[in-house]
Amino acid sequence: MSDLSLADRIDALLPQTQCTKCGYDGCRPYAVAIADGSVPINRCPPGGDAGIQALAGLLGTPPLPLDTTRGQHGPLLLAVIDEEHCIGCTLCISACPVDAIVGANKRMHTVLDDSCTGCDLCVAPCPVDCISMVPAQREWTQADADAARMHHDRRQARLAAPPRNRARAAPASNAGTGTAGVAGVGAGAGVGAGAGAGAGVAGAGAAAGVAGAAGAAGAAGAVAPAGAAVVAAGPTGAAGPADPDALKRATIASALERARARRARG
């Protein structure tokens, strides 16, 4: 007899795109809800009719037509970032459920095709509409589903870890290069806001901060050591706690202005 729970067996039949179209925050929560009998088996557009048939066979229930209010089944799509117009806001990195987007604050982002599940969760947060979904020209396989589940589980574990442990839990591809992981974990960029302040790029695991009016950030291009925190300087130059949300808003606003200016020039 299998040691797997019913939720485990249902989860094994789901495509693991983690698209949330079913109304749950990923494939595993949907599997648990199906096992509990609280939701029907037809709310997974990526799985389509084949997925519904597989679930019906496992549960011994009649198959249902796909609930198209959740989306339409179609060919696999991949996210593509228009790198010329990317402003490096990191919002798509935060949205990706499988760490398939790499980049750093105010630096160009790109999508790892082999890891992208086609969930399209990165499209809506992009403030400059530079992400599009294009046909992948291939089928989604069980190997893809297994890899996506692993990447999603690792991301969830990293986000659940205490802040001081997140650098160790960050994906190796991000931690070693100083690129930003999901939600900016792995690297941050400091933006100098005051006279004499310089932009500093923080290394892996560093927190980002804003230099205030006194310009206490130091010389431009200074690199903070791995694990260091860049703190905000107030009007008097006194150091205080970093405010990532304020930094994100200031960075996006500045980048949007630059993007608009570039487009206006032609």
Image (cartoon, rainbow, N blue to C red):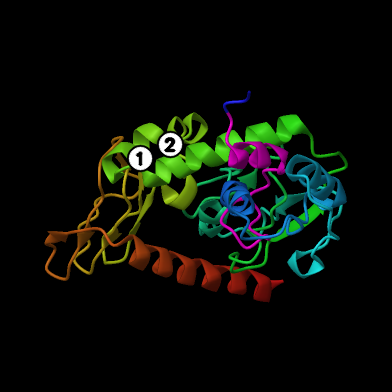
Residue at 52% over, 39% down = 153
Q: Are marks 1 and 2 in contact (CB under 8 Å)?
A: yes
Q: Tell me the tag on residue 166.
A: 1
Q: Quadrant of residue 194?
A: bottom left
Using the image, determine if residue 136 lies above or below residue 147: below
Q: Quadrant of residue 130?
A: bottom right
The residue range painted magenta reads: 4-26
**Other residues around mark 1 within 10 Å, as few (<14) / some (14–19) / many (≥20):** some
Q: Nearer the viewer, residue 211 or 166?
A: 166
Residue at 49% over, 42% down = 155
Residue at 43% over, 36% down = 170
Q: Nearer the viewer, residue 12 or 141?
A: 12
Q: Magenta span has 118?
A: no
Give percent across and percent down for residue 209: 29, 57
Is residue 233 among the parts visible in the rendering?
Answer: yes
Query: Mark 2 — residue?
Result: 170
* Principal secondary structure, stretch drawn in magenta: loop
Q: Nearer the viewer, residue 216 or 143?
A: 143
Q: CA distance from mark 1 to mark 2?
A: 6 Å
**Kind of residue at badge 2:** Ala
Q: Magenta span has 24?
A: yes
**Kind of residue at badge 1:** Arg
Q: Tell me the tag on residue 43.
A: none
